[in-house]
Image (tube, grey):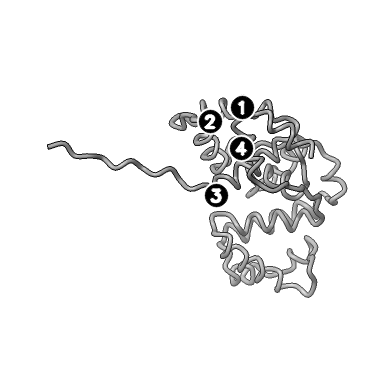
């Protein structure tokens, strides 16, 4: 694939690319559901998030409930599946926004990355990071980079020996490094995430006490 060849020009990233399988990005439908799923999964382990999202879908007699279907579910019922007050409100916020603005998947897929982020972050409960993740994993965009993602930060600190003590400077350095990955920064993020999650952490040296 072209993206693997391009990203391999970065010698440090090349090792990650060669060690991992090829990633494919998918353009998905029912974007409102993916946004709801993202809200549900916030600050939860993958396993717990999957359990709660499964409970969420079981509230309906269909696999892909519409925004109106979700809005028709009583607030207390959303709370009963394990959602906090805030998350239940945010899920309803997403659906109200989609209904009020008559949003379709086609409309969102036609937006540029910048337009999508600016538009979708109008919803209370949807921030910059969530919008960027939607661009990557739901809209299937190839050139998205998230300086605010903790996993990407941790991976780049380790791989490029960056100083993570100052977040602002760190993000500037991250953007500078990622500049050469364009227009395939989403793939680079995938390689970084996978490497961080599967690469053993460097062993700490034992301190030797001197007599």
Cα–Cα gap, marks 2 and 3? 16 Å
- Earlier sequence position, callout 2 versus callout 1: 2
Q: Are the residues at dot 1 and dot 4 in contact (C-beta closer than 8 Å)?
A: no
Closer to us: mark 4 or mark 2?
4
Q: Measuring 50% from the left and 34% from the top, which residue is drawn there?
A: 157
Horizontal and vertical percent for residue 100? 80, 52
Near-viewer residue (97 or 150) = 150
Q: Are marks 3 and 4 in contact (CB under 8 Å)?
A: no
3D distance between C-alphas at marks 4 and 2: 13 Å
Q: Where residue 160 is drawn, which disc sits there?
A: 2
Distance of label 1 from label 4 (alpha carbons):
16 Å
The CA span between labels 2 and 1 is 9 Å
Q: Quadrant of the C terminus?
A: top left
* Picture layout, residue 3 above or below residue 54: above
Which residue is found at the position 71% from the left and 37% from the top?
A: 144
Q: Which residue is mark 4?
A: 15
Give the SS element for disc 1: helix
Mark 1 or 4, which is nearer the eye? 4
Q: Quadrant of the N terminus?
A: top right
């Amino acid at each position: 694939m072209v993206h693997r060849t391009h990203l391999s020009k970065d010698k440090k990233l090349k090792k990650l690319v060669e060690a991992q399988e090829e990633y494919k990005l998918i353009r998905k439908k029912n974007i409102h559901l993916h946004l709801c799923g993202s809200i549900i999964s916030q600050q939860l382990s993958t396993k717990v998030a999957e359990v709660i999202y499964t409970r969420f879908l079981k509230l309906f007699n269909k696999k892909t409930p519409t925004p109106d279907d979700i809005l028709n579910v009583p607030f207390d019922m959303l709370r009963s599946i394990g959602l906090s007050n805030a998350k239940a409100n945010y899920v309803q916020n997403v659906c109200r926004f989609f209904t009020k603005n008559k949003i379709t998947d086609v409309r969102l897929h036609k937006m540029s990355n910048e337009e999508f982020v600016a538009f979708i972050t109008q919803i209370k409960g949807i921030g910059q990071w969530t919008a960027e993740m939607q661009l990557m994993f739901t809209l299937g965009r190839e050139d998205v980079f998230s300086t605010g993602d903790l996993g990407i930060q941790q991976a780049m600190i380790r791989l490029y020996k960056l100083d993570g003590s100052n977040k602002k400077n760190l993000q500037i350095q991250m953007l500078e490094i990622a500049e050469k990955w364009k227009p395939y920064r989403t793939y680079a993020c995938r390689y970084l995430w996978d490497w961080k999650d599967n690469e053993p952490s460097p062993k700490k040296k034992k301190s030797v006490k001197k007599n």
